[in-house]
Image (tube, rainbow, N blue to C red):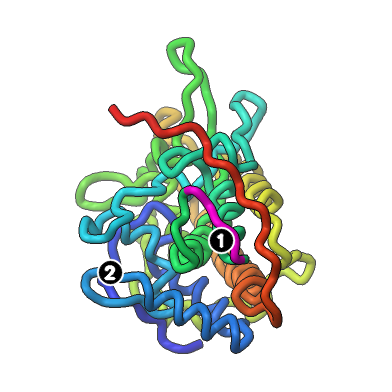
Amino acid sequence: MKSLRRIAPAMPAPAWDNGGHLLIADVASQRLNPAAKAELQRLAAQLPHSGQSYDFIGIACWMDDIKSDKAVPDYGMFKSWHYIDIPIDARGPMPSFEPGDDNDEHGNVVQALKRAVVVLKGGTDPYIKDKATACAMVMHLVGDIHQPLHCATKYFFSHDKLRNDKGGNDEFVVNANEPGGPLNLHFFWDAAYRASFDQTTGNVIFEHRWEDSFRDALPYNPDPKASFEPDFDAWAKESNAIARDFVYRDLTEAGDKKHCRLSSAYIEKARTISQRQLLLAGWRLATLLNETLGAPRPLPPPPSYPAGPPAIHY
């Protein structure tokens, strides 16, 4: 696997961390047909960031970069398009999987991917202005939808109100600490592919030289039973099942319901699951790009999804 690169320094991200997204893009790039790779590079060069252009790997970070780069036209947009709040039990409401009740400020990752693919196939969308933007979205969101806590949240009643833990963002890991305090469960899963357990301190540690450590450690093939064909509903439900059957179920509570401790066995299994999900995302991303950007002949543009209700600005 070639050296991974991007045009801007790494920064904290509310999805797979930047290393994870770059790894997914690199896995995908090795399975692209020549037409798809050339078109991906052409589109990536159209998206400016910090005075430079993206390449076909770095474009996977565009959706996180627009959260902080005030110089780009899309600064601050699409924040809710990174995740979908599917409940892990019957207490919570089911979100919509079809575009139409969403907009550029309120939507979810399944709706976003469906909209972006229409544009990649030559159609139009009320919120995605061009093919380069749609490509950047697909490069990032296919990764997000494979992170279990981007497709799950835990609902609970508190003071007679139904609340949720924001996909693990409100649940803190007491043995995963930064100078400002414990990290949350969502952050752990963003970087679980490079996490390990320190037997001396009992704490979670993260390998920072992830490129050297993991590019050869990942299995070459993902689960042979997995389907690579684009099915965003199914992908979200797969990730939700991982969250339901492992992420939340196997936590060790630490004092109260907002704090947990991760055991050595939990961290080891989380690392294995995360590496598998990264690889699966890369293969599925390649299949999607080959079927859209690398199609042997132009496809007829699919119907556009309607705009949802206008966003309310306060």
Which residue occupies 45% across, 65% down?
A: 136
Which residue occupies 25% across, 56% down?
A: 68
> Left of 211 or right of it: where is 236?
right
The mark lying in front, picked from 1 and 2, is: 1
Above/below status of 46 relative to 307: below
> Left of 135 or right of it: where is 273?
right
Residue 272 shows up from this direction: no
Disc 1 crowd rating (10 Å Cα; few below 14, some 14-19, many 20+) is many
> Left of 238 or right of it: where is 216?
left
Above/below status of 294 relative to 302: below
Which residue is farthest top? 160
**Mark on residue 49?**
2
Between 240 and 58, the residue placed more toward the observer is 58
Q: Say which element carries label 2.
A: strand
Q: Say which element carries label 1.
A: helix
Alpha carbon separation for disc pair 1 and 2:
22 Å
**Mark on residue 119?**
1
